[in-house]
């Protein structure tokens, strides 16, 4: 099993450009999450999904959109990138059921917006 | 929503000494407290967790304690080794919240050989 994978690993954008980050998991997990990680701020939840076709806002959703058309994929979109979106983005997934389930993280995408 | 505070933000210890990282949470409905270790350039990985019905849990050199009354939980690493150098995140999860967790800001631990 590959676990949780993210594409791309690195990206440099100019202000105003758009892009989509792809997260894929092969563990049949229901729940998926997008976080951003900034120095001194920990991991902050952007959006999450509790199943195919569902999405919900997290702590810092502004400037991002998401889609979960297939259970194994969770896409994060930036329609018009801004320098404030320079960050490391992590995707994570969790199995459905039970009360104490580990979040499995992807390797991250380092995004720089100039 | 839940708020998790973590300190210190940086911690340096001599190899072989102990390290303690402390966290507090705000929502008494939180019932699960995982700790993640993130090595430089890598993804966060779960190292230990504790549930609200348990006061302490150990796994070799690491242990976690929970004080529900005070809403405090702590990570203890004994006999530290250079490979323990990393950023450690505490987190808290509210019951029934679609497994969402709120993370602390992280503690950068440096173990000096």
Image: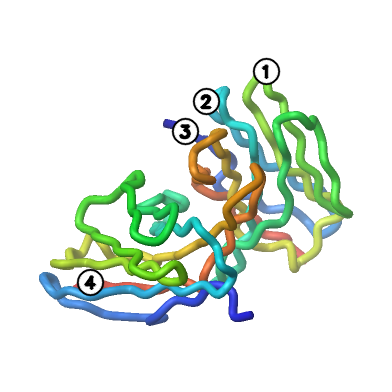
Estimate the spatial distance between the alpha carbons at disc 2 and disc 4, rounded to whole Å. Answer: 36 Å
Quadrant hosting residue B95: top right
Q: Is residue B62 left or right of residue A58?
A: right
Q: Which residue is tagged 1?
A: B69
Which residue is drawn at the image coordinates 76% and 41% (left, top)?
B64
Quick check: do tags 3 and 4 share a chain? no
Q: Which residue is tagged 2?
A: B27
* Residue A60 x, y percent position in the rendering: 30, 48
Pinpoint the chain carrying mark 3: B
Within 10 Å of disc 2 (Cα), the crowding (few <14, some 14-19, many 20+) is some
Q: Earlier in the sequence, mark 1 or mark 2?
A: 2
Within 10 Å of disc 1 (Cα), the crowding (few <14, some 14-19, many 20+) is few
Pinpoint the chain carrying mark 4: A
* Residue A31 x, y percent position in the rendering: 49, 56
Pinpoint the chain carrying mark 2: B
Q: Quick check: marks 3 and 2 in contact, CB under 8 Å?
A: yes
Q: Nearer the viewer, residue A60 or A48?
A: A48
């Amino acid at each position: 099993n590959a676990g949780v994978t993210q594409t791309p690993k690195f990206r440099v954008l100019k202000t105003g450009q758009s892009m989509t980050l792809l997260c894929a998991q092969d563990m049949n997990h229901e729940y998926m999450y997008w976080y951003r990680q900034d120095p001194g701020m920990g991991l902050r939840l952007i959006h999450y999904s509790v199943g195919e076709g569902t999405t919900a806002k997290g702590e810092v959703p502004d400037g991002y959109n998401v889609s979960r058309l297939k259970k194994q994929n969770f896409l994060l979109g930036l329609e018009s990138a801004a320098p404030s979106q320079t960050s490391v983005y992590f995707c994570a997934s969790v199995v459905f059921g039970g009360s104490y389930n580990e979040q499995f993280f992807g390797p991250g995408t380092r995004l720089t917006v100039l | 929503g839940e708020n998790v505070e973590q300190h210190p933000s940086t911690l340096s210890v001599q190899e072989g000494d102990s390290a303690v990282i402390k966290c507090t949470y705000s929502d008494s409905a939180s019932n699960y407290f995982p700790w993640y270790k993130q090595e430089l350039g890598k993804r966060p990985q779960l190292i230990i967790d504790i549930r609200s019905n348990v006061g302490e849990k150990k796994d070799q050199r690491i242990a976690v304690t929970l004080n529900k009354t005070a809403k405090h939980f702590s990570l203890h690493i004994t006999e530290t080794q250079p490979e323990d150098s990393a950023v450690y995140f505490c987190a808290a999860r509210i019951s029934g919240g679609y497994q969402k967790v709120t993370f602390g800001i992280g503690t950068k631990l440096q173990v000096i050989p």
